[in-house]
């Protein structure tokens, strides 16, 4: 081989093995002990940074592993003294799935910094810079490295010029570097070259990092193109935890880039040691479900829909006994996404667009059924949509009860720390970090605190992981097995958003907005309520109100909440009279005509099938 004459410069590597890689391939089940045994070698391997913290790792630590995520961070920091630690921060959503008050976001960042976090990759699902402001400011204030993020997607409104505009907004917010975050693995080499070059031209001194997933099989080519165009850093995972829906492998990318004249600081012998370690760990930590995954999901190249989202659609359709309609839903999805202003498909927008597409297909009429989350999204409670929603459609989606907003959603939230601290049993609070954990995931954190408060010898055991994943699959309804924590937590999203709506209305919560503490959705997930006994013969004559979907029937939006309508009440056409909860979302069922509710045909909490009579109006 001829000696290389070109020197392409140094390319840096961020190791994602301890965060994104095991989140993508091992259901986030790596333990702190697993990490600590190899952390020193990773620290010595010459990486630019080690990504080891984020919303999902935080959630799973508390929820399944009974570990304190803050303690994990401190322990990693003790060992990794050379390489900066990196985390993924969901902007105003911090480590959770909803908008938190500014004081909560600020203290969350402060404590992460204090406990050893160095680099914060801050992103927002809608790329709305207003949702990044508080987090970016806090990172700067507490001395961290603020990496502003472009959530990459493909749509007519996501042009290179728009991405550059977003990058300048991030620069104005104090970004120390910019990350192109391709969560679905749809960034082609050509698009990477174009985007990185444009960013280079617009802000020559701004470091650019690229994050992709190997899902579509393009990852290595994309990274090469990005590096050649001036990206200084790429995200890779050690080979055992790479590829599939994870990042491309560090070892292979190093060989590719070296062959093209790039220098790197990586130590190949150390990479070998790290990989040998994880190859051994794999048997213990890789869940059953991810052993059957296809190496490449070429469908992503055709429809640009992330693989995880399709498996969620599949399980939602299975719940509706309508798996045969998947192709129709896949065809509907881009139309719904267009109608909703082309949001990037990432939590929570992927769930909103996905569920609405399913409703549009199954409901017969498009937007005949609009879940609360779509209403709130259209009303501005998630932030500004990339393209405006057509005014007429927006009016229909938002409905009468919700007030549309233009402001930064978190502007409506009162300070939250003191209230959270007051809510918590003081014996549970060992440090300020516990209050933050509670703010992020109240029920999950409480479960952890209670477990922690038990004497060490008598705590509930944490099952071994492979067993655990089997147990989880057995415990969950078949259609829900394999959903990630984000999907599970989405069930809580609508209820938490209700507090924003309440704030915007200056008080009362609309009847059809589920209350923050509403529990029926959760109860339904674990135990099936008694089957409905419609007793059709006994129903009075009148106009039947039919269930539009399979789901669970409710008269009210949660325990202690008033019924939407009483038997005998007079209603107008379009009045909400009951709820069918389906796909973990609440759907208010409206009166088809004016009249008196002659009878409800189903018990509160009962399972209903599409087409069942719920009530009769006459
Ligand atoms: Co990722």
Image (spheres, helix red, strand yellow):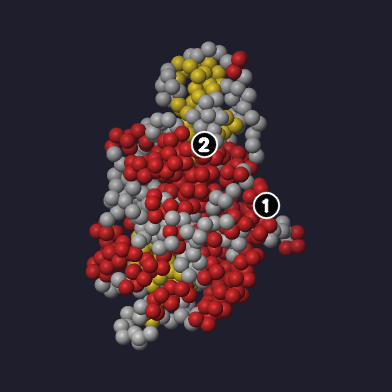
| Disc 2 residue: CB within 8 Å of ligand 1 | no
Name the residue at 58% across, 43% down. Answer: 479
Q: Is residue 317 or residue 494 the one in the foreground?
A: 317
Q: Is residue 200 or residue 589 the one in the foreground?
A: 200
Q: Residues within 10 Å of mark 1 (few under 14, many from 20)?
A: few
Instruction: Give the vertical position of 508 relative to 382 (above or below).
Output: above
> Looking at the picture, how far across and down is residue 317, in whole percent?
51, 40
According to the image, label 1 marks what residue? Answer: 471
> Looking at the picture, how far across and down is residue 606, in whole percent?
61, 30
> Looking at the picture, how far across and down is residue 146, in whole percent?
38, 67
Q: Earlier in the sequence, mark 1 or mark 2?
A: 2
Mark seen at residue 341: none
Name the residue at 38% across, 85% down. Answer: 1
Helix, strand or loop at label 2? It is: loop
Instruction: Give the vertical position of 21 relative to 254 (above or below).
Output: above
Residue at the extreme right of the image, as rendered:
457
Q: Nearer the viewer, mark 1 or mark 2?
A: 2
Helix, strand or loop at label 1? It is: helix
Instruction: Give the vertical position of 519 relative to 245 (above or below).
Output: above
Residue at the extreme bottom of the image, as rendered:
3
Q: Residues within 10 Å of mark 2 (few under 14, many from 20)?
A: some
Marks 1 & 2, CB-CB < 8 Å contact: no
Residue at the extreme top of the image, as rendered:
541
Q: Can residue 1 be seen in this view?
A: yes
Instruction: Give the vertical position of 212 relative to 494 (above or below).
Output: below
Name the residue at 62% across, 43% down. Answer: 477
Between the residue at mark 1 and the residue at mark 2, the CA separation in whole angstroms equals 27 Å
> Looking at the picture, how far across and down is residue 293, in whole percent?
54, 56
Name the residue at 48% across, 16% down. Answer: 543
Q: In which quarter of the image is residue 141?
A: bottom left
Q: Is residue 433 visible?
A: no
According to the image, label 2 marks what residue? Answer: 322
């Amino acid at each position: 081989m001829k000696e290389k004459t070109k020197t392409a410069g140094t390319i840096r590597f961020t190791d994602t093995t301890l965060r994104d890689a095991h989140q993508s391939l091992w259901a986030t089940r790596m333990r702190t002990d697993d990490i600590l045994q190899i952390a020193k070698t990773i620290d010595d391997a010459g990486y630019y940074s080690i990504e080891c913290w984020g919303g999902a790792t935080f959630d799973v630590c508390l929820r399944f592993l009974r570990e304190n995520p803050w303690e994990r961070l401190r322990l990693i920091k003790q060992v990794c003294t050379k390489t900066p630690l990196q985390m993924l921060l969901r902007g105003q959503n911090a480590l959770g799935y909803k908008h938190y008050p500014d004081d909560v976001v600020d203290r969350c960042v402060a404590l992460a910094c204090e406990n050893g976090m160095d680099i914060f990759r801050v992103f927002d699902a809608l790329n709305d810079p207003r949702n990044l402001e508080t987090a970016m400011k806090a990172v700067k204030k507490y001395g961290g490295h603020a990496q502003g993020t472009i959530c990459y997607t493909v749509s007519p409104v996501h042009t290179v010029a728009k991405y550059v505009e977003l990058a300048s907004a991030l620069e104005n917010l104090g970004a120390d570097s910019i990350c192109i975050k391709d969560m679905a693995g749809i960034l082609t080499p050509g698009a990477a070259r174009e985007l990185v070059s444009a960013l280079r031209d617009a802000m020559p001194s701004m470091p650019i990092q690229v994050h992709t997933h190997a899902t579509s099989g393009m990852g290595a080519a994309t990274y090469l193109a990005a590096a050649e165009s001036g990206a200084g850093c790429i995200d890779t995972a050690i080979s055992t935890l790479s590829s599939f829906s994870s990042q491309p492998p560090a070892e292979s990318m190093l060989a590719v880039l070296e062959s093209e004249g790039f220098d790197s600081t990586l130590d190949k012998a150390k990479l070998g040691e790290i990989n040998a370690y994880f190859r051994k760990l794999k048997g213990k930590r890789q869940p059953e479900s991810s052993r059957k995954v296809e190496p490449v999901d070429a469908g992503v190249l055709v429809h640009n829909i992330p693989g995880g989202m399709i498996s969620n659609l599949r399980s939602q359709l299975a719940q509706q006994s309508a798996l045969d309609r998947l192709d129709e839903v896949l065809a509907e999805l881009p139309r719904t996404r267009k109608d909703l202003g082309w949001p990037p498909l990432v939590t929570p927008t992927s769930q909103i667009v996905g569920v609405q597409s399913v409703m549009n297909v199954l409901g017969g009429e498009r937007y005949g059924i609009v879940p609360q989350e779509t209403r709130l999204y259209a009303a501005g409670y998630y932030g500004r949509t990339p393209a405006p929603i057509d005014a007429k459609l927006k009016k229909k989606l938002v409905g009468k009860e919700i007030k549309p907003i233009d402001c930064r959603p978190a502007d409506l939230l009162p300070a939250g720390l003191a209230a959270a601290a007051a809510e918590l049993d003081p014996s549970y609070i060992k440090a300020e970090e516990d209050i933050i954990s509670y703010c992020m995931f109240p029920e999950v954190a409480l479960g952890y605190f209670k477990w922690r408060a038990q004497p060490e010898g008598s705590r509930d055991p944490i099952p071994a992981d492979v067993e655990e994943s089997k147990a989880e699959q057995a415990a969950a309804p078949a259609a829900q097995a394999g959903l990630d924590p984000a999907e599970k937590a989405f069930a809580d999203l609508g209820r938490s958003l209700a507090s924003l709506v309440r704030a915007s209305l200056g008080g009362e919560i609309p009847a059809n907005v589920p209350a923050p503490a509403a529990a029926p959705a959760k109860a339904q997930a674990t135990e099936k309520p008694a089957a409905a006994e419609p007793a059709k013969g006994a129903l009075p004559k009148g106009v039947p109100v039919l269930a539009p979907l399979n789901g669970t029937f409710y008269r009210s939006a949660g325990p202690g909440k008033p019924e939407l309508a009483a038997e005998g009440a007079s209603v107008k056409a379009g009045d909400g009279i009951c709820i069918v909860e389906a796909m973990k979302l609440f759907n208010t069922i409206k009166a088809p005509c004016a009249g008196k509710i002659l009878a409800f045909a189903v018990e509160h909490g009962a399972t209903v099938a599409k087409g069942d009579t719920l009530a009769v109006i006459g």
